Image (cartoon, rainbow, N blue to C red):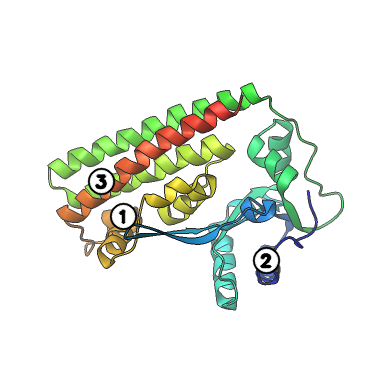
Amino acid sequence: MKKSLAHLPREKQTELILITEKILEQIPDVRTIALFGSYARGDWVEDTHLEGHTTHVYESDFDILVTTKTKKEAEGPDAHDRVEKAIEATKQVETPCSIIYHTFGYVKQMLLEGHYFFVDIIKEGVELYRKKSKYNLGPANILTPQQRKEVAEEHFKQWFKSAKEFYQRFEEAFKKRQYKNAAFQLHQATERFYAAVTLVFVNYRFRLHDIEALGRKAVSYNAEFGKVFPRDTAGQQKAFTLLKKAYIDARYKKEYRITKKQLEYLDERVKLLQRLTKKICAEKIESFI
C-alpha cells in the first residue's frame, strides 16, 4: 500500500487529513484507515459535460476503508453518524465521502481468501493511518482471471434477477395506482441494479440505500451511468429526490406524494439503468479473461 498523497491536489490532501482526524476522534479503537478507489489511483473525476440540452455531472467520492478492533465498532451506526456529522461540521470537506467499516480481522481473512475488492485496496490504496506497525493489511491471495469471472457472473445473476423482480412489483403497484408502493419498489430495483454493477466491478456491495451515492459509484466504473438521472430541470431534480427518499418516506411518511407523471418519467430512467447494467456488466465480465 502506498504512503503518500502527493499525487493529489493540496486541497484534496487537506480534506483527507481532516476526515482522518474526525474518524479517529469519533471511533475509539481504529486499527487502520486507507484511501482506495479513484482518488488513490489518481483517476478521479470532477467534470461537467453538456450533451444536447442535458448536463451530466461526474464527481468521484473519497472512498475510505476503516478497520476496527471489534465488530461493534465496525457496525455501530451511531459512531458512523457521528463521523459523518463531525466531517460535515468542519465545513471544509467539499468532496463527497464514502466510508466503509470492517473489523481488522475480517479484512485480513478476506485477503487470505483472495476477495479482490480488498486485494485491490492493498495494491492501489494509500495508507492514511495505522495504529501500530503490527497492523499490516496483508498478505493477500490473488484469484485467477477465470476465478474472478466466475465470481462476477454469480453476482450478476443474483442481483440483476433481484432487481428485475422488484421492477415487476413496481409495474404491478403502478397499474393498481398504488403510487407510494410503486415508488418504493422502483427505488429497490434501482438499488439492486447498482448493486449488480458494484459487485461485478469490484466484488463488493456497499451497504447503502442512497441511490445518489450508489450512482456515483457506478459512474466511477463507467461514465455512461452518468446519463441515467439527469437533473437539469426542477422537474427532473424533484422526481429524482422523490425516488431517492422513497426507501423511507414512501413507506412511513403520510405526507409523501408522487404523481403518475413523475413515476412514468422515473420508469424510463430505470429502464435505461437496466439496459446499461446488462451491457456494461457483460463487457466487464468478459474483460476478466
Kindly state the secondary structure of the residue where label 2 is placed.
Answer: helix
Of the image marks 2 and 3, the number of the one nearer the N terminus: 2
Q: Is residue 81 left or right of residue 187?
A: right
**Which residue is disc 3 drawn over?**
267
Amino acid type of disc 3?
Asp
**Which residue is disc 1 drawn over?**
243
Residue 208 seen anywhere in this rendered image of the structure: no
The location of residue 120, given as percent across then percent down, is: 69, 41
Q: Residue at x 33, y 64 (%)?
A: 232
Q: Residue at x 70, y 30 (%)?
A: 113
Of the image marks 2 and 1, the number of the one nearer the N terminus: 2
Amino acid type of disc 2?
Leu
Whether pointer 2 and pointer 1 mark residues with C-beta atoms closer than 8 Å, the reply is no
**Numbered mark located on residue 16 in the image:** 2
Which quadrant would residue 53 be assigned to in this image? bottom left
Report the Cα–Cα distance between label 2 and label 1.
31 Å
Q: Residue at x 30, y 41 (%)?
A: 271
The location of residue 150, given as percent across then percent down, is: 56, 23
Residue 179 seen anywhere in this rendered image of the structure: yes
Report the Cα–Cα distance between label 2 and label 3.
38 Å
Does residue 231 lie above or below 199 as drawn? Answer: below
Q: Residues within 10 Å of mark 1 (few under 14, many from 20)?
A: many
Does residue 174 lie above or below 81 as drawn? Answer: above
Kindly state the secondary structure of the residue where label 1 is placed.
Answer: helix
Amino acid type of disc 1?
Leu
